[in-house]
Image: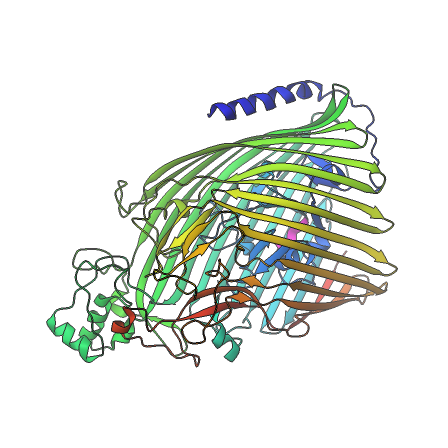
Amino acid sequence: MHPRTRLRLTALAAALAPLWDAAAATPAPDPDIAPTVVEVVGTTPLAGAGVARERIPANVQTLDAAAANGTGDSTFPDALSRRLGSVFVNEIQGNPFQPDVSYRGFTASPLLGTPQGLAVYVDGVRMNQPFGDVVSWDLIPRAAIASLALMPGSNPLFGLNALGGALAVRTKDGLHDAGTSVQAQGGRYGRAEIGFAHGGHDGGTGAGLHWYVAGTGFREHGWRAASPTRLGQLFAKIGRHDAATDVTLSAALASSRLTGNGLQDARLLARDYASIYTKPDETRNRAALLNLAASHALSADVLLSGNLYARRILTSTLNGDLNDDALDQSVYQPNAAEQAALAAAGYTGFPTRGATASNTPFPSWRCIANVLRADEPAEKCNGLLNRTASAQTNYGFDAQVSASGRAAGMAHQVALGTAFDASRVDFRQGTQYGYLAPDHGVVPVDFFADGTETDDDGAPVDARVELAGRTRTWSLYATDTIAVRDTVFVTLAGRYNRTTVHNRDRITPGGGGGSLDGDHRFGRFNPAAGVTWTPWRGLNVYAGYNEGSRTPTAIELGCADPAHPCRLPNAMAGDPPLKQVVTRTWEAGVRGTAGRTHWNAGVFRATNDDDILFVADNAAGFGYFRNFGRTRRRGVELGADGAAGPVALSAHYTWLDAAFASGETLPSPANSSADADGNIGIEPGDRLPLVPRHLFKARAEWTITPAWSAELGMLATSAATARGNENGAHRPDGVRFLGAGRTPGYAVFDAGTTVRATPRLSLFAQVDNLFDRRHATAAQLGATGFTADGNFIARPFAAQGDNGGIVHATFLAPGAPRTIRAGIRYAFR
């Protein structure tokens, strides 16, 4: 352990030692001048360490069950985007269950290789997966959500990846959610969804059993071409409780088949809004989670809690892409007869043996030679099919003691805990040659179907990857909320994490050049401190500072060698060490109540040191991860909610400046401002891509009669720069460079209504994107393989040598058009 870290831990332990001795003492009455209704928020992933919201030095946001899984929002990420301030969704994958959820410019994404800056927990179990820290939203049982809290900032108590915030979800149980209900709905684009829930208990509020089960089935054709979705979820919980103890065992099963057709050339999108670039683009997930949780009150002031969990996730993907470049390997040199045949087909300028992706145009000469031998056209090599399969297993525990007591004349709320998480990942990947069909689907070339074809030197042409990885993380954490005065509360917290990552390459073992073998260790203590002050009833002032970190993931460590670049998520290579990403966040604000209105206003600033970026090779799209200097996110948040008679209103506004804080040179050949080598220069202050500067959302809920209600919502964002336009200097010329290199601002509305026909029967209807506004939620610059009419560009290879034939376009992630759905819900009791 680093001496400085040891000193910090020793000081923290010394400060908390007297509190532990006094924890069992009966505390004196603790005056609370907060509003009459006090909302208690969990300050750690486990239940038990609850603190009044007004004593937390951050702008915590919460949703109850009705808001988190109500009929007005189509998916869980949709509910987060519409109802929580500073949350924005990028529909990069093009599937409602696969969005990138962004909060204050930090992301939780299901896509491998995306830097993950948010931690997600369900009942104390971390949902960020072992391989890549990704978050699969389709695996979170939305129907079972009882409440959620969005904890802002780099709060160290929520462990790794909580750089910009942490989302803590609690599930329902039979004690608090007794009853039985069924629900069904259908809508446009073949949408159909059914669900049920049942909860109950015996023994009343005394000792006894309690149980809860919920299930959901979802399917739709999708509004874009070839974009079906299938999803099934089942959640069950059984427990036993008495006056002092509660023990529960929960299980969550999920199976999904998601089609995410991703970005599309803006020209083709204008021609056909439902069009796709290439297909197939399919992800299949199967997951099972077991979580044994328990809590026991030693006294009125001391609570022990913990959980023991195990999780298994199987994921496979199939993606069809254009073969935009040769694989990074020695290429096949055609013989004289093959050269003559290729020349007759219009291909000249053959490479010499030893050529690589940096000097060889697409597609691979070996593929062309083989299809010519089979009397097939050479253009049968213009596609690739990328396949991945991963099996992830993780297990661990979290144990915590929370107590209240008095020491040195002040009241304390203390929580001490330890956590352990272990995981194993088996990852396989391969690329198969194919050709593009008229419907933009990629059809495999038969003689590469076994995925084992090699060139004359024995190098695999399918860029196979087989990686086994093991990760272990130990954590110790503590927090103390101190009542310095009746109106002033100080919070001190910290967490130490120690992580080991062991990668083993099953194809090239031994740690040589290009091998994935590597052993890595990371450790860090992250502190936090804050203060809240309530000068008078209805007004609360807060300020805080905290630090968080994330360790490089196995996929980043497996693609960090400039000498052996890779093409993520399609391949990985050698793994020099990367540094941890460290985020330091300052936050301050005021909040309060005025009659029936709750309001907040705050500012924040978060700085990432040693941020990790993917650096691409211009010629072929290969690249590697490396540590970048600094990025910065700062902003202003305003929010209010209240009621005016029968109408409940809410509004959130965020001004967010997400920018680079240090200079950098990055490759971006699709940017018109790139130099002769395809590089662009980034200056401090240049904006991070995909993050809008202005975000506004508002909702109105009108109780027309006791049995009839209606809701209207709006979400508006400003423009955001595209990936590849990080310097903001892209200027299209309409010939070689197309599109503005950004997404324009937009506003979309939604409306819904619910009618309670009887006390048990409810009918509802919802319209999303009420005015059918065409909009884009993300953008990226890149070379396009199609003309404005959607025809494939058969690019002569000789013309590609000087980049003369390549056309660069702006690719957009289109938002869904107007969708209408209606349903029925029946509660049996």
Queried whether the magenta region covers residue 245, the answer comes back as: no
Determine if residue 469 is in view: yes
Quadrant holding the C terminus: bottom right
Q: Position of residue 708 (x, y in %)?
A: 82, 66
Answer above or below: position of 374 versus 627: below
Asked which quadrant contains residue 71, the reply is bottom right
Tell me: 131 left or right of 79. Answer: left
Determine if residue 43 is in view: no
Answer above or below: position of 394 versus 361: above
Asked whether 823 or 131 is in front, the reply is 131
Asked which quadrant contains residue 518, the reply is top left
> How many discs mark residues in the rendered view?
0
Which region of the structure is painted magenta? 142-147
Answer above or below: position of 530 versus 701: above
Asked whether 750 or 600 is in front, the reply is 600
The residue under the point 82% across, 42% down is 539
Queried whether the magenta region covers residue 143, the answer comes back as: yes
Answer above or below: position of 149 versus 386: above
Tell me: 741 left or right of 445. Answer: right
Q: Position of residue 546 (x, y in %)?
A: 61, 37
